[in-house]
Amino acid sequence: QVQLVESGGGSVQAGGSLRLSCAASESIVRIRVMGWYRQAPGKERELVANILSGGSTNYADSVKGRFTISRDIAKKTLYLEMNSLTPEDTAAYYCNARLGLISPTDYWGQGTQVTVSS
């Protein structure tokens, strides 16, 4: 079982930047997919970005060009660099790790709040 701990959330003004971190309890090399999701009040949780074990990345259209997902395998940490933040980015951000291929299992962090004021 993988434990995930997010950090780096906070309050910023529109146009600002934040970097989220997600520390894993074990090596992330074998994790098939790691990603960031977010959930705003009254809305469903949505994928923000993910990175596959081979290093390829995917982004939601709403964050392309502004957010960058990356990982440091040695530090067992996933990152989300967020630039040009807007109030629409306000949400709780969750780290996700998906293990297994045939019967994948999802692990989630506790979430970190990002609030962007106009």
Image (cartoon, rainbow, N blue to C red):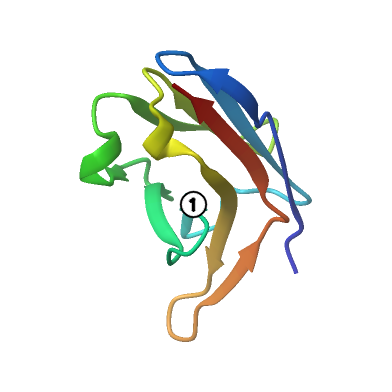
Between residue 82 and residue 102, name the one nearer to us. Answer: 82
Q: How many dots with numbers?
A: 1
Look at mark 1 in the image and give the residue it sits on.
38
Name of the residue lying farthest toward the front: 118
| Left or right for 82, reference 20 | left
| Left or right for 20, reference 16 | right
Instruction: Name the element at disc 1.
Output: strand
Residue 14 visible here: yes
Q: Residue at x 49, y 52 (%)?
A: 38
The amino acid marked with disc number 1 is: Arg
Toward which corner of the image does residue 89 lie, by quadrant? Answer: top left
Q: Residue at x 29, y 43 (%)?
A: 59
Between residue 100 and residue 67, name the one nearer to us. Answer: 67
Of the 4 image quadrants, the one containing the C terminus is top left
Spot occupied by residue 58 in the image (x, y as percentages of width and height):
28, 46
Residue 72 visible here: no
Name of the residue lying farthest toward the left: 61
How many neighbours does mark 1 have within 10 angstroms: few (below 14), some (14-19), or many (20 or more)?
A: many
38, above or below 75, in the image:
below
Name of the residue lying farthest toward the bottom: 103
Spot occupied by residue 9 in the image (x, y as percentages of width and height):
65, 32
Q: Residue at x 57, y 33 (%)?
A: 115
Of the 4 image quadrants, the one containing the N terminus is bottom right
| Left or right for 31, reference 10 | left
Spot occupied by residue 113 in the image (x, y as percentages of width and height):
64, 41
